[in-house]
Amino acid sequence: MAIFAKNRSSRNAARNPRSGAVCAFAILAALAGVITATAQAPRSSAAKTATAKSKPWTAPRTPDGHPDLQGTWTNGTITPLERPDGSRVTLTKDEVDRLEKGAEDRAKRLDEPSDPNRPAPPKGGDGSTGAAGNVGGYNNFWLDPGDRVAVVNGEWRSSLIVDPADGKVPALTEEARQRNAARAAELRGRGQYDHPELRPLGERCIMSFGSNAGPPMLPNYFYNNNYQIVQTRDHVMILVEMVHDVRIIRMGGEGLPSHLRPWMGDSIGRWEGDTLVVETTNFHPLQRFRSASESLKVIERFTRVSADTILYKFTIDDPSTFTRPWSGEVPFTRIDDLIYEYACHEANYALSNILSGERAREREQLKKKQE
Amino acid sequence: MRNKLRDVLVALAGASVAAAAFYAATPTEGQAPASRIPRTPDGRPNLNGIWQALNTANYDIETHLARPALAMRPGPVIPVPAREVVALGAVGSVPAGVGVVVGGPVPYTPEGLAKKKENQDNWLTRDPEIKCYLPGVPRATYMPFPFQIFQSDKAFFIAHEYAGAVRNIYLKNPGPPQVDSWMGQSVGKWDGSTFVIETSGFNDQSWFDRAGNHHSEALKVTERYTMTEPDHIQYEATIDDPKVFTRPWKIAMPLYRHVNKDARLGQFKCVEFVEELMYGHLRKEPVK
Amino acid sequence: MRRRLWILIASCGLLCAATPVAGHHAFGAEFDPDAPIRLQGKVVKLEWVNPHAWIHIEVKKPDGTTEVWMVEGGTPNTLLRRGLTRESLTYGTELIVDGYQTKDHSLKRANGRDVTFADGRKIFMGSSGTGAPRDGRDPIEQKKGRGGF
C-alpha cells in the first residue's frame, strides 16, 4: 500500500491522465490505475430523481413562502477541497466505484481483529504520517469521514473547489505572504508548546479543528460533519455540531461596525429567488481562514435541490490575501439522525496533556544537562 | 439589633413566599389577552425573540441577602473576601434577591444538603461557571445573559449567549437519551398555549446557581413557557431528582423580551477567557 | 500484519488534500513516540466525553500491585450514531491496548492506537446500521436513525 505523499507540483502542471499516484486518493484508490478522461452520467439517486417520469420535484416551503432548508444535514464526503493533480473536474462511474469501494474495504480491513499477542509498537514511532503523528492515532472505528464522493448537478466531483478551473486555492498575494512571514518571525524563539494561546483553535476547544462553522462550512474529513438548520421569518440559525457553534444569520439589517469582530463573523442573509444568499464579514482576527485578512468576505448560497440535498456554494473574496476570488460547491445531504452535544472544553484533557508533556520534557532535558 | 435583623429576614422570607404565591397564581392559558400575543401561522404563541431573566437567581435560587463576596475567609473581626477575589471589591459582591423557588426551601436529602455546603465552602474550585463550562438546565435560563428562541414550523431551538450553550428542543421524541450531556436531551410539546419542555439525560456536573445547589445524573426538568403578554413569558421549571431531593420542587420567574429594535444575541465564547486560570500553571514560564 | 498499522494514514491523505490543518488531534504533540507501551487490564471507568473519550483500565504490575491507565479514544458521537452507547463496553471487560505514552510519563496515559478485547477483536464494533453509507446519500438504503426532524 502506497504511503500517501502530497504532490506539491506546480499548479500549471499538465494533466497527466496516466499518473498512478493521485494525491488525496492515493490510499483509497490503491487499486486505481489510470484516470480516464471521459465523464459518464452517474447513476446517483439524485440524478434518477431529476429524470424521473413523475412530475419535477419542487422544494417544500416554510409558512412565509421561502424554500425550506430546515433539517439535519451532513457535508461529510471523500471529495477533498482541492483537486488532486491529474484529475479532471468530474470522475467517472468506475473511478467513483473504486474510491467508494476502496474506502469501504479499507474500513473493513481496519476493523479486523488484531493479534492478541501483539507487542507494544516500535520505539521511535510507528511511521504513521500526518495527523496520526508517528504514534498511530487511534482506531478507525472512531472516525466517520463520509464515504461518498460529492455529487453536484449529477456530476461526481473530484474537488469541492470549482473556481478557479484547476480546482485549487489561488496563490497568496505578496501582502499575505509578508503577513504570514511577519507572524512566523514573531513566533521565532518561542516554542509552539510554550503557552495555550499558541496552540491551534481546535486544540483549545474554541472552534473546530477544520472549518466546520467557518464560514465557509467545510467538512473536516474526520467526523461530526453535521449541521442543523432552523428557519424563522427573521433568522436562519445553523447549529454546527463541531464545536456546538451556532451561526445566527439575520435576514436583512445593518452590519456590525468594522472594529467588532466576533467568531464566525457577522452574517446577513437575503433571498434571491429560491436561493438563500448569506454574506459574512467582520471575522475574528484569530480565525484567519487559510491566511485570510480582516477584509475577508464569504458569500454562501444555499439551494434546496432535492428532498435530501442542499447545494451549498461558497465564494471567498479577500483581495488582500488571494490573487483572485475562489468558489466551491458542497452538497449537504439529509441525515436521519440527531446532532449530539460536542462539549469540548469541559473535558479537554488533550490540551493539558500537550502542555504538561512539553514541560516534563523540558525538565528532563534540564536534568540531563545538569548531570 | 438582632431583632431588626430578624425582622428583615422574616420580611424577606415573607416577600419570597408572597412572590412565589403570586407567580403561582399568575394567569396561564386562557386568561391572558389572547389577541395581543404574537402568533405563528398555526395559531401558537410565537416565542421567537431574545429573552432574559431579570433576577439574581444565578447567585442563589433561594432568597438571599447581599454579602461581600462569593468566596470568603476568616478575618480578624468578621469574615472577609477570599484572597482570590478581594481585588474585585464591590464588583465581586453578591446582591440581595428574592428566591425563585416556589414554596419553601429546596427539599434536599441530608446527603444532598451536606454536599451543597461542601460546594459553597469550595466554590472557587467547584463552580462550573468559573471554568466556562456549559451551564446545564435550568441555570442557563437565568444566567445574566440573554438567550434567543428560534421557533419555526419544524423546530424549537434555544441559543444562549453564555458560552454558546445550545438547546435543541425535539418536537418528535427521539426516545430515551443515549448519552449524558451538560444540557440534557429536551423534548417539547404544546399544552394549549404553554410550551412544555421535558429534559433528561444530564450528567451530574452542572449546578443550579453560584450557591452550590446541585443535582445528580438522575435529574429531570420540566419547564413551562407561557407568554402572558407580548414581551413577557412566565417561566416555571420543576426539578425532579430523587437521588438528591426528597420530592420534586419548582422555580418560577418572568422572562423579559429585549425590545430594542437592534437587539441581537451577543457572543460570549468564554473558553479562551479562562485559559490563564486553567492552564497558566502549564506555561513555559508562569505570568508574573 | 502491517494493515493494522495504517490506522490514520488515509485520513491524513484526505486531510492533506483538504484544508491544511495545524494540529487536528495533534497526536504527535501529545504522545511520545519513544515511549511505546502495551497494556492489558480491566475496564474500571469509561469517560464518554468530547473531544476524546477516555477508557480507564486497571493493569497488574509485575510486583502484583495494580495501577490505572487512561487510554485516549475519539469522539463518542461517532459511536452514538452507530447505535453504540457507553453501556456497549462493560466495566470489568479485559482489554489489550498498544500505543504510546503521553510525553508527560508521570500521567499514566496513552493513545488508544489499537484497543481490542483479549481475543484481539476490536472494541466498539457493534452497530445498528445496515452498512449503508454514513453520509446518508442513498435515502432508500439509509438506516433508520433516531430521527432528524
Image (cartoon, rainbow, N blue to C red):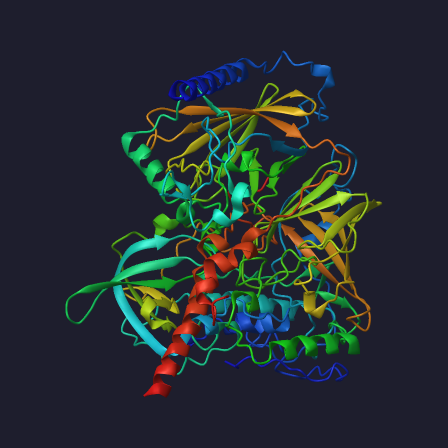
In the image, A183: left or right of A100? right
Q: Which of B53 and B10 is in front in this view?
A: B10
B71 or B241: which is nearer to us? Answer: B71
Is there any visible trace of residue C71 in the rendered image? Answer: yes
Q: Give the answer, above or below, for where B9 lies relative to A329.
A: above
Where in the figure is residue B286, as x and y percent of width and height? 47, 67
Front-most of residues A38 and A74: A74
Q: In this view, does A256 lie above or below C114?
A: above
Q: Quadrant of residue A149?
A: bottom right
Position of residue B265 in the picture relative to residue B208 (left or right): right
**Residue A229 horizontal/vertical position (percent):** 66, 44
Look at the picture and state if A6 lies above or below C121. below
Q: In which quarter of the image is the C terminus of chain A?
A: bottom left
Residue A68 vs residue C34: left or right?
Answer: right
User: What's the residue at 50%, 72% (across, down)?
Assistant: A193
Name, please, the residue furthest toward the right. Answer: A273
Residue A82: image x %, image y %? 69, 71
Q: In which quarter of the image is residue A176?
A: bottom right
Question: Closest to the observer: C118 or A152?
Answer: C118
Locate residue C54, reporting x and y percent. Answer: 38, 58
Residue extending farthest to the left is C64
Residue A51 visible from this viewpoint: no
Residue at 39% x, 69% y is C113
How many discs appear?
A: 0
